[in-house]
Image (spheres, grey):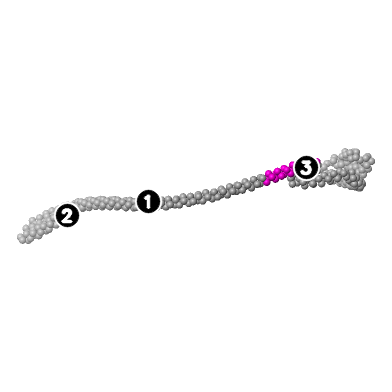
Amino acid sequence: MANIVKIDPLEFGLTVETAANIENQFAPMLAKMTELEVEFNGVLALDKSLPTTAKKARELRLKYKDVRVGTEKIHKVQKAYYLNGGRFVDSWKNIQAIASQNNEEVLESIEKHAENLEKERLERLQILRVALLADYVENASDLMLSSMPDDVFEAYLTTKKQQFEDKKAAEAKAEADRIAREKAEAEEREAQRMENIRLKAEADKREAEIEAERKENARIEAEKEAERERLRKIEAAKLEAERARIEKENADQLAKLQAEKDAEIAKQKEMARKIQEELYNKRIAEEEAERVRIAAEKAAKLEAEKLAKAPIKSQLTAWVNSFQIPQTAIEHEKKALIIEKFGRFLDWAKNEVDAI
């Protein structure tokens, strides 16, 4: 059976007889394994895709399971047997060990009586020396003081005590120096504080004086500035009045010049208008005179022709009635006088004709 491994009982310290007895307990299961190996090899040679192969593999697997479970039961029984034997052996060992140990302890206490007394003495000595040294050395209980000879411990104790007292004295001196130094520093600080208060008071006084002087200077400067402002306003008012006067004079002068210019322009326009009017009137008068002349000439010609046929008185009357003064745009005081005298002339002429 290729898969069964042989076990050497000598590796476990067993005799051949004991090993044979254990192997005989497992022999049926080993024989069953040998029988199943033929079937195992047969199943391996079958076609795995066939349902019958799967069925045979399952049946064989369950047989192997029965062998494995049977083997475990045998193992459990055999192991329990040997475990109980081991516990039985342990019980015998413990009983004998306890009986022997109690006697050993009694005998050992007798054997080490002197040693134990020395140990107790050293322990008491350790406690005593720790108590003597505790005030001068930290963690004195950690030191092996009991092993020191008396003279060595005395010297060690004296040295540590002296060192402790020197340290205390140094600390006391340092503390005194510290207190004195702190007192001196406190006094110095107090003196400095008082000096600072005095200096601050002087500074505050000086600051107040400076502030008062600044305010006074500011007041004086404000008064001066107010006076300067007043003078500036007066000067500005004068300048403004002078500017207004000059502007008024300039405006008046410009207005006068403009009025004169406007008057001159109006005069020129009026003169131009009058000239245009005179020219127009003259042209109209000339045209009217020419028309009248032509009409008069025609009328005169007709009248002459008529008069030539009429009596002399009618001819003279018609002739006098034809007398006219031409229209003119001339404006002169003599114009009215001339017109008046012309009217009187007509009246005289008519009277003369009537007198015929």
Q: Nearer the viewer, mark 2 or mark 1?
A: 1
Marked residue nearer the N-terminal end (2 or 1): 1
Give percent across and percent down for residue 346: 10, 58
Marked residue nearer the N-terminal end (2 or 3): 3
Give percent across and percent down for residue 271: 21, 51
Q: Which mark is residue 331?
A: 2
Q: How far apart are the two marked residues, 2 and 1, measured between alpha carbons?
A: 71 Å
Q: Which residues are magenta?
A: 149-172
Left or right of 181: which side holds 161?
A: right
Residue type, numbered disc 1? Arg
Left or right of 240: which side holds 162?
A: right
**Residue at horizontal 12 percent and vertical 58 percent from the top:** 340
The question of residue 162 being in magenta is answered with: yes
Q: Badges 3 and 1: C-beta atoms under 8 Å apart? A: no
Residue type, numbered disc 3? Glu
In-front residue for pair 106/15? 106
The question of residue 56 being in magenta is answered with: no
Q: Which mark is residue 228?
A: 1
Query: Within 10 angstroms of label 2, few (less than 14), some, or many (20 or more) residues?
Result: few
- Report whether residue 38 is seen: no
Q: Which mark is residue 7?
A: none
Q: Badges 2 and 3: C-beta atoms under 8 Å apart? A: no
Left or right of 123: which side holds 246?
A: left
Quadrant containing the N terminus in the rendered view:
top right
